[in-house]
Image: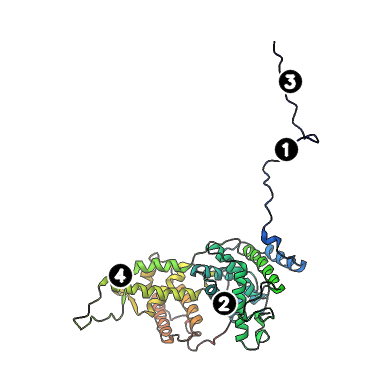
Amino acid sequence: MPQSKPPPPPAGPPRPGTNAAPSIKKNRPPPPPPSSSSQNRPATTAKTRTSMTKTATTSSPFSEHEHRLADSELPSCIKSGLTPEEERSRRRRTCRFIQEASRQLKLDLNASGTSMVIFHRFYAVHSFLDHDRFEVAMACMLLAAKTEECSRKLSHVIRESWRLKNMAAKKGGGGAASTPELGDAVSDNVDKHGYLNPESEEFVRLKERILLLERVVLHTIGFELSIDHPFKFILVQIKKMIPLRVEYINPTMPPTDPTKQRSTPMEKNKKLQLQLTKSAMDFASDSLQTNLCLKYSPEKIALTCIYMSAQYCKVRPTERRKWLEILDSDSTFTINELTSIAVQIMELIADKKGCDLAMFESIRSDLTRMKKDVSGERGPPSLEKGMDRPIKRQHI
C-alpha cells in the first residue's frame, strides 16, 4: 500500500541561505523611479521651499463664485495697496508678454489663451507682490502647453521668455533700474542675442523657481485645466447668423461693367462670414488681457465680440430685429452684461495705434440706445468713462 505524502510545511519567513522570494504586501505599488529632471535639479533653499509650500497649501480649488469680485476687492488691491488701475495695468502688460512669448514659442491661440486664463485665476487668489508675475507667466505657459498637447521644453520657455523680458527692460531705457517690475532682467549672463546662458547659475536658479511655481499654480487653480475659450463659440454662432439673421448696412452695388462677373449670394455670405469671424477673433483675443474670464462665461464674451465685430463691419440684423434676439435665443444674455463686457474691451484697445475711435463712439451710442429701449433708462455712466480720451500707452 503506497504511503501518503507528508503535508507541506506551513508558510513562513524564508530561512537564511534559501532562494525563496520574500512575501510582498498587497495593495502597495512599488515606488516610482526617480526622474532624470529631479536628479539634475539643484537643492532648494529652506526659505524658498517653506514659502512655496505655505503658498500652495493655503489655496483652495478654483470655483466661479469665489472670483466674482470687484477690482478693488482683489488681493493685489487689499494686501499690496495697489489701486484698481494699477492692478489692471499689470494684468494687461503681463498678458501682452504672454501673447508675445507664445508667438516666439509657436503656441497656438488656445494655448496662449489658456496661459492667460490660468494667470488671471492665479492672481485672483494671490497678490502681485507675492510672486514675480513674469515667472508666474512662464509657469502658466508651461502648464498651458502641456494641457493643449503642444508641450515645450522648460529650457526653451525660459530662454525665449527671458529674451523678451531682457529686450523690454533695455527698451525702457536705463535697463532694470528704470523698470523695477522687471527685476533682474538685465544680466551679465545674457549673450548678444538676448538669451540667458543655460550653463549659468542664474539659469539654474530660475529653472528651479519655475518648477516650484508650476506646483503652486496647480494647487491654486485646484488642478482645473479644462478651460473653454470664446473662439469656438464665435465660429458656431456666426455660422448660425449667416445668411438669414444679418446683412450689410450698405450692400455693395452690382458692377456697371458688363464684363465683370457679379458675386453670387454664396460668395457674399462667405465674405461676410470671414470678415465677422476675423474681427470677432481679434476682439476675443484682446479680451483675454482683462479679467473678464473671471466674471463672465466664454459664451457671453463670444456674443459680445460678435456684436462688436458686426458694428465694425457695418452689419445689422435683418427684418429690424434686435441684437439680443439674434445673439441669444435663450434670453439669458442681458443688455447690462453686453454693455459691461463691451466697455472693458473698448477701454483696453482704445490706446492701440490706428484705433478707430469713431467706431467706438458708434458702439457706445448703439449700446445707449439699446439700454434705453430695454429699460427706458439712459445708458450707464460706465459707457462714458475712458471713451473721450485715449488711454496712455504702456509698455511691458
For residue 261, side relative to residue 26 (left or right)? left
**Spatial distance from mark 3 to mark 2, Cα to Cα?**
80 Å
For residue 67, side relative to residue 52 (left or right)? left
In the rendered image, which quarter is residue 250 located in? bottom left
Q: Give coordinates of residue 238: x percent, y percent.
A: 37, 69
In the rendered structure, are the residues bearing label 3 and label 2 in contact, judged by CB atoms less than 8 Å apart?
no
Residue 384 vertical position relative to residue 106 in the rendered view, above or below: below
Crowd band around label 3 with a 10 angstrom C-alpha radius: few (<14), some (14–19), many (20+): few
Q: Nearer the viewer, mark 3 or mark 2?
A: 3
Closer to the chain start, of discs 1 and 4, is: 1
| Numbered label attached to residue 6 | 3
Q: Which residue is tagged 2? A: 97
**Spatial distance from mark 1 to mark 3, Cα to Cα?**
23 Å
Mark 3 belongs to which amino acid?
Answer: Pro
Closer to the chain start, of discs 2 and 1, is: 1
Q: Which residue is tagged 1? A: 21
Q: Which residue is tagged 4? A: 243
Q: Nearer the viewer, mark 2 or mark 4?
A: 2
**Spatial distance from mark 2 to mark 1, Cα to Cα?**
58 Å
Residue 206 visible within the image? yes
Q: Give coordinates of residue 10: x percent, y percent.
A: 75, 28
Color style of the picture: rainbow
